[in-house]
């Protein structure tokens, strides 16, 4: 129905940059909102950033000045440019998308980001 595949994770040093990508395919209609979430070990999954269907973006306060989420108009791909990475950004990053009528939430398997010296 809806498949999401993340890529671009890895091990980087503090202060480095990394770009994550999410590719979505849907057999049930248009992909609506798309977003990024992350889950660190021992913590709950948390919101990171999203692109609403009209193009508006939203960010968690802790990443607002460092991360940029982008979705090309009319495309089902989304990127997350992450700069000045910190150890606390270490987590499994998940792509999320809404699709269908009524819209349902779908998740990718995640891509690991580790920030360590």
Image (cartoon, helix red, strand yellow):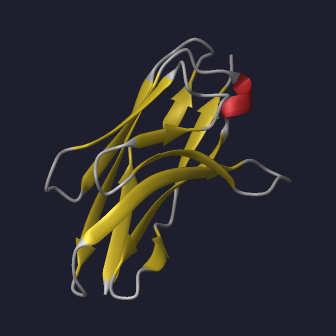
* Snapshot quadrant of residue 89: top right
In the drawing, does residue 1 fall left or right of residue 94? left
Image x and y of residue 94, in percent: 53, 56
Tally of numbered discs: 0
Q: Residue at x 55, y 14 (%)?
A: 84
| Residue lying furthest left | 74
Q: Residue at x 22, y 74 (%)?
A: 30
Image quarter in which the C terminus is found: top right
- 48 above or below 29? above
Q: Residue at x 67, y 36 (%)?
A: 90
Image x and y of residue 2, in percent: 33, 79
Image quarter in which the N terminus is found: bottom left
Foreground: 56 or 83?
Answer: 56
Image x and y of residue 78, in percent: 31, 48
Image x and y of residue 98, in percent: 40, 71
| Residue lying furthest right | 42
In the drawing, does residue 70 fall left or right of residue 90? left
- 11 above or below 41? above
Foreground: 117 or 94?
Answer: 94
Q: Residue at x 36, y 67 (%)?
A: 4
In the drawing, does residue 92 fall left or right of residue 28? right
In the drawing, does residue 78 fall left or right of residue 17? left
């Amino acid at each position: 129905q809806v498949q999401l595949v993340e890529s671009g994770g890895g091990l980087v040093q503090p202060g480095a940059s990394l770009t994550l990508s999410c590719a979505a395919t849907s057999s049930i209609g248009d992909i609506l909102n798309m977003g990024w979430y992350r889950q660190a070990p021992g913590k709950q999954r948390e919101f990171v950033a999203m692109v609403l269907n009209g193009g508006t973006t939203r960010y968690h306060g802790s990443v607002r000045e460092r991360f940029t989420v982008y979705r090309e108009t009319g495309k089902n791909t989304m990127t997350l440019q992450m700069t000045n990475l910190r150890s606390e950004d270490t987590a499994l990053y998940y792509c999320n998308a809404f699709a269908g009528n009524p819209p349902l939430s779908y998740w990718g398997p995640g891509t690991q980001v580790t920030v360590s010296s």
